[in-house]
Amino acid sequence: MTATYLYCEYKPGLEGIPAAKSGISYVDGKQGILEYRGIRIEELAAKSSFLETAYLLIWDKLPTKEELTEFETDILYHRRIKYRIRDMMKCFPETGHPMDALQTSAAALGLFYSRRALDNPDYIRQAVVRLLAKIPTMIAAFHQMREGNDPIQPNDELDYASNFLYMLTERKPHPLAAKIFDVCLTLHAEHTINASTFSAMVTASTLTDPYAVVASAVGTLAGPLHGGANEEVLLMLEEIGSVENVRPFIEKCVANKQKIMGFGHRVYKVKDPRATILQNLAEQLFEEMGHDDYYDLALELEKVVEEQLGSKGIYPNVDFYSGLVYRKLGIPTDLFTPIFAIARVAGWLAHWKEQLGVNRIFRPTQIYTGVHNAPYIPIAER
Ligand code: SDX
């Protein structure tokens, strides 16, 4: 459906409409290419780390050894959260979704750091460090408290990825698990103007504080059509239950035009390159830690969906295999999307910083479909 109006075509969901000029990442949906600051995602997944990638995305350069060490150390020093935020979390219902707990506590960070100095590079860096450092701690703290436990303090001997897994279990993770988890964070860090990044940009365009920007984006990421899909994929696999049930399940979804979680993408019309890397990571974990029958289900799902919907460009996206990796790492299903948020904070903040340099408040127009000069009818006459 398109309608020509004023200056350009109206496209539902702004499909294909540029909302910004950006040099942060690039996606070729036809060839399945993803680049962060021009570097292919396969290179970064194989050779970089999440914090180095975050630095690249935000400051548009690969850090020197000294710059990276200073950045990692800054983040390590800021991992702890204010006791008031912990006390606030104690009032959250254990049954609440961790994404709602994260959105609330991300916004609460702003209460402690409300001074806005958006033209000061030191303020920008401080906000980046605090958000990257504290988001994992807040997620892990909520998880411990909903289990009835005291939060586990960050372990300063552990790197970024290992420390998050440690705060969930109080055990130092297997080196392979920590490495693979770090790669997952790199893969989820950035993806041009997706819904949650766009939400961050719109919020940032009013020159509010970066904590409100991230809180907006967390709320957007939570939806099942976006970051929430990784949790939905696992629930779908549980529902299907066996390889034999895959085909009937898919045929029913297709017949009812029901979206299959973990498949399809606004931009990719081939298999998401991140899905391919995540699939390989899952296979590495299965080799080391034992097979997961859900993987057989996933392979059959991918085969049947390609058969039925491949012609429409419906292939696995980033959310299809990520959950199988997290499940093998022993991470609860409802923490999958908060983990997506841990990583995507890097992308949201990269776009926040880029936009501040050329900011103009977002204020699109509309195609008015209502009436004019309508009468006000007194309530007694309605
Ligand atoms: C992420 O934008 C990003 O970059 C996002 C992301 C990132 O890194 O930030 O990549 C992360 O959000 C990945 C997507 C996770 N979501 C899901 O897995 C949920 C299932 N996927 C769909 O809801 C859907 O594919 C979207 C939301 C991802 C994209 O939707 P679009 O571009 O609006 O596509 P559409 O709904 O207009 O569908 C176009 C056609 C329709 O068929 P027709 O009406 O033309 O016959 O494709 C069909 C749809 O029915 N279709 C699907 C499908 N996705 C699209 N059919 C079955 N299953 C699906 N998953």
Image (tube, rainbow, N blue to C red):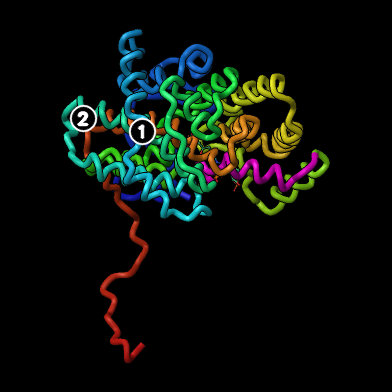
Question: Residue 226 at what x, y percent from top left?
Answer: 50, 42
Q: Amino acid at mark 2?
A: Tyr
Label 2 vs 1, first from the N-terminus: 1
The quadrant the C terminus occupies is bottom left
> In this view of the protein, can residue 12 be seen by the observer?
no
Query: Is residue 191 found left or right of 309 in the rendered image?
Result: left
| Of the pair 254 and 184, the residue shown nearer to us | 184
Query: Label 2 vs label 1: CA separation?
Result: 19 Å
Question: What residue sits 49% from the left and 23% below the top?
Answer: 34
Q: Which quadrant of the figure shows ligand 1? A: top right
Q: Which mark is residue 80?
A: 1
| Of the pair 260 and 166, the residue shown nearer to us | 166
Q: Residues within 10 Å of mark 1 (few under 14, many from 20)?
A: some
Question: Residue 321 at what x, y percent from top left?
Answer: 63, 31
Q: Amino acid at mark 1?
A: Arg
Q: Residues within 10 Å of mark 2 (few under 14, many from 20)?
A: some
Q: Residue furthest front?
A: 150
Question: Residue 140 at what x, y percent from top left?
Answer: 47, 38
| Of the pair 203 and 13, the residue shown nearer to us | 203
Height in image: 279 above or below 210? above
Tell whether position 91 is magenta.
no
**Callout 1: SS:** loop
Question: What residue sits 23% from the left and 32% below the top?
Answer: 356
Height in image: 104 above or below 204? below
Q: Residue furthest bottom?
A: 380
Question: What residue sits 36% from the left and 24% below the top?
Answer: 76
**Callout 2: SS:** helix
Does mark 2 have its CB less than 8 Å from ligand 1? no
Q: Residue furthest right?
A: 244
Question: Residue 366 at what x, y percent from top left?
Answer: 33, 54
Question: What residue sits 43% from the left and 33% below the top?
Answer: 153
